[in-house]
Image: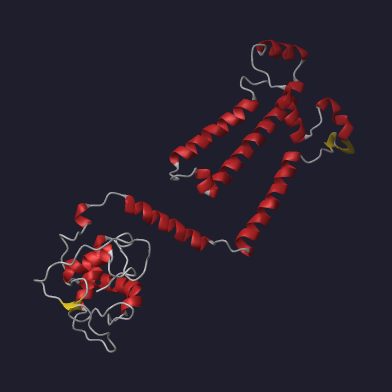
Amino acid sequence: MKKLIPSYVRVPLLFAVVFAALEYFIDSGDRPAFIKFPMVALFLGVFLFLLIAIEIVIDAVDKVTYHLLTDEQKKQLADAQSVSFTESSWYQNIVSKLTRSKEIEREEDIMLEHDYDGIKELDNVLPPWWVYLFYGTIIFALVYMVRFHVMNEYDQEQEFKNEVALAELEKSKMPKDPADEVSYETVVAVTDAASLAKGKEIFNNACAACHKADGGGLVGPNLTDKNWINGGGIKNVFKLISEGSKNNPSMVAWKANLSSKDIQSVASYILTLEGSNPPGAKAAEGEIWTETAAPAAEAVVDSTKVEAPAEK
């Protein structure tokens, strides 16, 4: 039956509403959601396909229903819809090409000779929209296979890691509880086992490459003696790890990668290494530090590299 709103208006309108809703509710940053998240694009494609398929089915049902009406009912329907919008011939042509269905009046052209208790079978061709969709799935499968199984672009594990990294980045932008923040002015050395264990873990993962796991020094200086290049004590060590060293570019700022609490923990752990005298430790560098010495000069922040977090 003819609709008040034609299908060629109704389908794009519904699709646009769903598309706008997804873009509004999904936080995709500076890129559209359907570009940043492939599953959104896939959902939109399936949704559009379903909208078109439903319209095709409704159109077919309308044709059959209209054919079953009496002449008087057809006349009454035409009079009732005389002021409504009608679908244009180009839309009907598109539907005809997508379905390639025969008009009811011409069904005898494709009627098979089979007769099952008065029920006859039509030799309809597969709808082109279905055939094109099938070809599309084959192309999609080939592209997917080449991209992910031949070129090994990335796997689900890597995708998970990327999403976790993005989530951590977004989390770092959120307002932080002042009680959880530590600054150069407020930092004190922690001595509880949990904090020192956390500091040791960070040290082994990030600092040991330059300072050795025992702190004896490798590329970086020895952290177990009383000598310090940039000043010792919890405040100077905290500041050096946080902001990096202006004297050594390889000692970069770690405040973008570690929380202030973590920097406090690793700085406190480094101070516990003093006097451990590990075998093969490097010779002392810098000056002997005492708490009465002047604080080290302000370090230059350099966040272009990510390497070992501490220079003594």
Q: Quadrant of residue 247?
A: bottom left
In the rendered image, the vertical position of residue 215 relative to residue 180, given as above or below: below
User: In what quadrant of the picture does the N terminus appear?
Assistant: top right
Q: Which residue lies furthest to the left in this view?
A: 292
Indicate the position of residue 45 as horizontal and vertical percent values. 60, 42
Q: Taking 298 as reference, is 129 left or right? A: right
Residue in the picture at 64% in, 15% down: 84
Residue 2's quadrant in the figure?
A: top right
User: Is 19 or 53 nearer to us in this picture?
Assistant: 19
Residue 310 horizontal/vertical position (percent):
28, 71
Q: Which residue lies furthest to the front in this view?
A: 247
| Residue 161 x/y as whole percent | 45, 61
Residue at 33 percent of width and 71 percent of height: 308
**Residue at left offset 33%, top offset 51%:** 173
Can residue 129 be seen at all in this image of the molecule? yes
Q: Quadrant of the C terminus?
A: bottom left
User: Residue 90: x, y in percent?
Assistant: 73, 25
